[in-house]
Image (tube, rainbow, N blue to C red):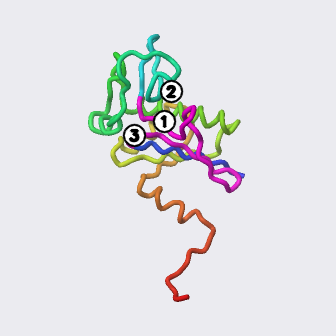
C-alpha cells in the first residue's frame, strides 16, 4: 500500500496527517499537541529550532520566537530575521518542512511514498515551497492550495453521497 504524508503549513500552525492502509491519521508534531506553531528560534549555540516556546523545542533561545505572521512576511519580503541571521523564505520553509518530515518518519518508522504540502494563500508562492522541499531533502512533493485541499476529502471518499431526492 502507498503511504502519503500531507503537511499543512497554515498561517499560524503546521499540521501533518498520513494516509496508510486506507486510514488517515493526524500525526502529533508537538509533545502534547497535534500541531506546532509556525515559528523559529535561534538557540544559545546559534542553531535554528522549530516551535513556539522553549519547552516545545527543548532548549534556551535568544530573543523572541519569529512566528505570528511569519508566512505573510515571507511572502511579502522573501525573507525573515531569525536571531541574528537573515534567512530567505526558502530556507525558513525548509526548516519547517524538514522538522515535520523528520518527526513523521519517526512516527511512521519509515519514509512515506508520497508527500503533499498544503500551502496557505498568505504564504510564499509555489516555487518557494518546491525549492524549500528540495533544500529539506524530502524528495519530490505535490503542492496543493489550501482551498483545493478542502475539496480533496470529498473526492477521496469511496462512499456514495446522498442526492437531493425526496424520501
> Which of the 4 image quarters holds residue 147?
bottom left
Marks 3 and 2 sit apart, C-alpha to C-alpha, by: 15 Å
Q: Going by the image, does 106 lie left or right of 64?
A: right
Q: Is residue 78 left or right of residue 107?
A: left
The residue shown at (66%, 54%) is 23
Instruction: Kindly identify the residue that appears in the image at 47 percent across and 27 percent down.
Output: 50
| Element marked by disc 2 | helix
Q: In this orientation, which residue lies closer to the viewer: 134 or 61? A: 61
* Residue position marked by numbered label 3 in the rendering: 12
Q: Residue furthest bottom?
A: 166
Q: Earlier in the sequence, mark 1 or mark 2?
A: 1
Residue extending farthest to the top is 45
| Residue at the extreme left of the image, as rendered | 76
Q: Quadrant of the C terminus?
A: bottom right
Residues drawn in magenta: 11-39
Q: CA distance from mark 3 to mark 1?
A: 8 Å
Apparent side of residue 91 relative to residue 107 in the rendered image (left or right): left
Residue 130 spot, x, y in % from top left: 46, 40
First of labels 3, 1 by sequence position: 3
| Residue for point 66% across, 36% down | 107
- Indicate which disc residue 36 carries: 1
**Residue in view at x 48 percent, y 35 percent:** 36
Q: How many neighbours does mark 1 have within 10 angstroms: few (below 14), some (14-19), or many (20 or more)?
A: many
Instruction: Please tell me the numbered disc located at residue 56.
Output: 2
Amino acid at each position: 500500500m502507498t503511504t502519503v504524508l500531507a503537511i499543512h503549513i497554515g498561517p499560524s500552525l503546521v499540521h501533518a496527517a498520513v494516509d496508510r492502509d486506507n486510514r488517515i491519521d493526524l500525526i502529533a508534531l508537538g509533545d502534547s499537541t497535534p500541531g506546532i506553531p509556525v515559528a523559529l528560534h535561534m538557540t544559545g549555540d546559534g542553531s535554528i529550532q522549530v516551535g513556539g516556546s522553549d519547552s516545545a523545542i527543548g532548549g534556551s533561545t535568544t530573543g523572541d520566537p519569529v512566528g505570528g505572521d511569519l508566512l505573510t512576511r515571507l511572502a511579502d519580503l522573501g525573507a525573515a530575521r531569525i536571531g541574528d541571521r537573515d534567512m530567505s523564505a526558502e530556507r525558513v520553509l525548509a526548516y519547517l518542512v524538514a522538522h515535520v518530515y523528520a518527526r513523521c518518519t519517526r512516527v511512521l518508522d519509515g519514509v512515506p511514498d508520497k508527500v503533499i504540502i498544503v500551502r496557505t494563500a498568505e504564504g510564499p508562492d509555489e516555487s518557494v515551497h518546491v525549492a524549500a522541499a528540495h533544500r529539506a531533502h524530502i524528495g519530490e512533493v505535490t503542492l496543493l492550495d489550501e482551498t483545493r485541499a478542502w475539496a480533496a476529502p470529498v473526492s477521496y471518499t469511496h462512499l456514495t453521497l446522498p442526492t437531493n431526492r425526496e424520501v
